[in-house]
Image (cartoon, rainbow, N blue to C red):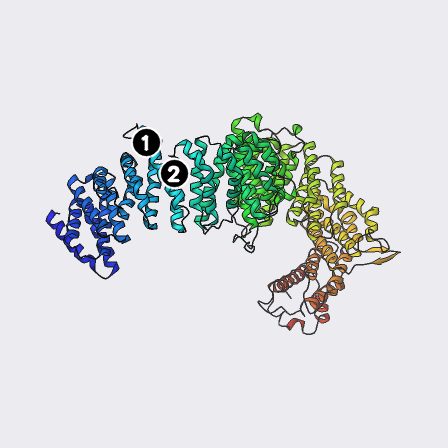
Amino acid sequence: MGESRVKKLATVLLDAITDKDPLVQEQVCGSLCALGESQPEEALGVCEEHLRQHDKLAHPYRAMILRAMETVVNNHLSELDKDTARAVILLASGEMTRVKELVYDWQQAASSVLVAVGKRFIGRVMEELLSKFQPGVLPHYFVVQTLASLSVSNVFGMVPFLTSVLSTMLPMLGAAKHDTMRVVFCSALQHFSESTLEYLANLDQAPDPTVRKDTFAADIFSAYDILFHHWLPSREAKLRLAVVEALGPMSHLLPSAKLEEQLPKLLPGVLALYKKHAETVHVSKSLGQILEAAVSVGSRTLEVQLDILLAALHTQVCVPVESSSPLVMNNQKEVLRCFTVLACCSPDRLLAFLLPKLDSSHERTRVGTLQVLRHVIYSAAAQMEVKKPFILSSMRLPLLDTNNQVKRAVVQVISAMAHHGYLEQPGGEAMIEYIVQQCALPPEVEPQKPGPDGEDLLADSVRTISISTLYLVSTTVDRMSHVLWPYLLEFLVPVRFTEALTPLCRSLVHLAQKRQEAGTDTFLIQHSDNVTLPSPYALTTRLLAVSSNPYLGDGRGAASLRLLSVLHRNIHPLLGPRWATTIPLLLAHLDGHTEKTLSQKEWEEKLLMFLQDTLAIVSDNTWICQLSLEMCKQLPSYNGMPQEKNFLYKCIGATLGAASSKEVVRKRLQELLETARYQEEGEREGLACCFGICAVSHLDDTLAQLEDFVKSDMFRKSVGIFNIFKDRSENEAEKVKSALILCYGHVAARAPRELVLAKAESDIFRNMSQCFSTKVLGIKVETKDPALKLCLVQSVCMASQAICSSTQGSSFHFSRKAELVAQMMEFIKAEPPDSLRTPIRKKAMLACTHLVSLKPALEEQMQADLVHSCLHSVLAVLPEPEGEDGHQESLYLDTMQALEDLLTSLLQQNMTPQGLQVMVEGGPAGVLTCPQYVGSSVPC
């Protein structure tokens, strides 16, 4: 693209900049900048010429062109030649000072062009500015503003000019009567001071390394005198803030003696501004700079002012911080910076002031104090080193505070302590326990109402920050490794820390892996050295039990199994190779499912297989018996967790099944029978499963222990009519019988089939009947409790099914068959004929289905009575309307299927035509043609 073409295109664009459409104006500016990318000098020249030739162009359009020029200069500063730079400087200077009145957008745009060019051509820009910055005449506002901006953008270029600038400026300060000019002079003094300090801090890179602070001290003090004594008392808030912003960096350049002399007035003067301004961030920032300057010169005056300073700063830090207010948050940061300065110079005085305030009952006072404490632990670590025991002991009351704001602040303090070695001191363990306690808080589903400070008081937020803190401290703070390991293991077993299990396991896995990398000796847990640590049996029991509900607590199942895996050598030295194969398979199964898709039954079976496999690998009776003891000991811990307790019962059964000591097996079973909470359905089921699993290996001992309990005084008292467990109700006694009957059913279902046949009549069915119907004063008393009936039906069903599935089942002669069928018929007849309320009749028919296939065959009349009773009980029941109750509809269909299976079984047993005739004639009128029956698959 030729130069003439660029000029023509730029001219067209510049003519279009006066379009009334703001979008067109924006596009024109963008196009000018794009043109400047290819030909920066040409584009700048066209813009400069256009502004000179169009003297009447309104200032908004002039500002747009100047902003485009600034963009081009910033992007291509290194490509500009001196002539172009000079032309741009003269244009911008003229535009900036053309009118005396402030036209901010236009004049600021021109000033920005000068600042951009001054990054490279500082001498030429300063030459132009100083021509308009003459002694005895107040300069244009934007000349001063541009000088201030240049000192920020080009420190090394500008500082050498400051001596002459300051000597010219000082007389002007007294002549400035308008607040606007005073504000810009304050801004200039602030930036000049900041630039000088930066220059002095980087003398090794500076063009003139001979520059010293003393060079500026006298001029800065003269300016300070005017700002502090004459301008700071102004009623204009904007001017006061401009003054205080300047005083901070200026204080570093004051002569040491003058600063010391001024501090008794300066500090109270700055502190007084806290009461005059709502937004105090500039006050706090300046105060921090003044304090740093005072400390750097070894001020003694600071000690006298310390109490006033601490009180004022503490009031500021206790102001509630709203996340929507950056000014308030920035003020907090600046106030904390002030505390750092004071902590470094007077740590004793600071702590003597702070720590008693931790005992305050006022929430904001305690939270603010904790924030300061956390900050100085980080920022004044060396000074706080010898104060660690004192600081730790002062945390006693905050640890007891239940307010969520305080809790969050306490957790943050403990995090800081962890990074700086506090938790290695005596009392450090209490801090770790506090973090774990907060991890164990129950997750909040619904947010609580906002607190008075506008913050949501979410218990979950305390828990979340505690979980993050525990993990970060465990994984990133190396010095905490020997503090947390093996101490964190102590929190795994106590039930009050259940909600903290997942973060605990994750932290422990990381710590254990780090120990393994360091060497075996450091990894093995020496239980003899620390009696509070959980034993291998306690760890195994706990981690296995909670894994049964794997997705609860943010995935505690996977976390627990991973911890078990890394602890394998501590659990038992033989388990490593086997667990390296089996545990990843369990984890993969969890990864392949969600809480909704996981089959609980299948998962528990996998865990039980894992346990049984583990026991087989260990193959040590003493170890296994010890594990069973621990499992029984932990059972009461799960009273509020039915699923986990049910599974733990199964684990006990599996562990006892692997034990070779019959004495231990019987003792544990006896303890379970004596301590079970029979009133809870889940526990009755769990106890029965335990006995069933144990019976796989110890059928005789299991049955003997059940019979001993049935014969014991304890059981007799529970079912007696005059003395029912003293404080137990009659209903609770029925629950004991229900559990025992279920135990017999599960024993029959799980034990080896051939062994069950020998015990079926003499032990299993006889004791079932004895538990169900009790003789009192020679009179047979039967229960009306539907739950007890259901247990009997279910157990009869399981036992008879076990007999049928045995290889010798077809030749087994069951003398109690008719008695049990009659009992089932009684249950069926007792059910309401017009409705389904319980699954009793369904399960009773299933029991009969298995019973009728056993020898001897039922008499034809009993067969007919059975069929009649079942048909009469079922076919008169109408199904629930579709969609109204899915459970009832399912129960109805299951019951109809059970009836069909029973009739099929009867016909398979060669029921005679006479029996069939009796069934039809004795059944309900029209039974074979009723709507529910017609079309069914019942083989009649």
Q: Please name whichever residue, 139 or 863, is drawn nearer the observer in this view of the structure.
A: 139
Image disc number at residue 650: none
- Amino acid type at mark 1: Thr
Residue 890 sits above or below residue 41 on the image: below
Distance between the alpha carbons at the discs numbered 2 and 1: 16 Å
Q: Nearer the viewer, residue 483 or 787?
A: 483
Task: Please report contact status of discs 2 and 1: CB closer than 8 Å, yes or no.
Answer: no
Question: 660 left or right of 935?
Answer: right
Seen at 21% across and 60% down, the residue is 19
Q: Residue 14's x, y, as percent?
A: 18, 54
Determine whether 871 is above or below 136 in the image. below
At 15% from the left and 52% from the top, the residue drawn is 50
What is the x, y in percent for residue 135? 25, 41
> Is residue 571 visible to the viewer in this orientation of the structure?
yes
Q: Residue 20 appears at what percent x and percent y? A: 23, 62
Q: Residue 429's x, y, as percent?
A: 61, 35
Q: Which residue occupies 42% across, 47% down?
A: 233
How packed mark 2 is, by other alpha carbons closer than 10 Å (few <14, some 14-19, many 20 or more), is many
Observer-nearest residue: 260 or 553?
A: 260
Locate residue 213 relative to residue 910 in the image: left or right.
Answer: left
Which amino acid, mark 2?
Pro
Mark 2 or mark 1, earlier in chain: 1
* Residue identified by numbered label 1: 215
| Badge 1 density bin: few <14, some 14–19, many ≥20, Cα 10 Å | few
Which image quarter holds the C terminus? bottom right
**Residue for badge 2:** 249
Tag in front: 2 or 1: 1
In the rendered view, does 22 fall on the left or right side of 244? left
Vertical side of 918 occupied by 360: above or below: above
State the SS at label 2: helix
Residue 475 visible, this angle: no
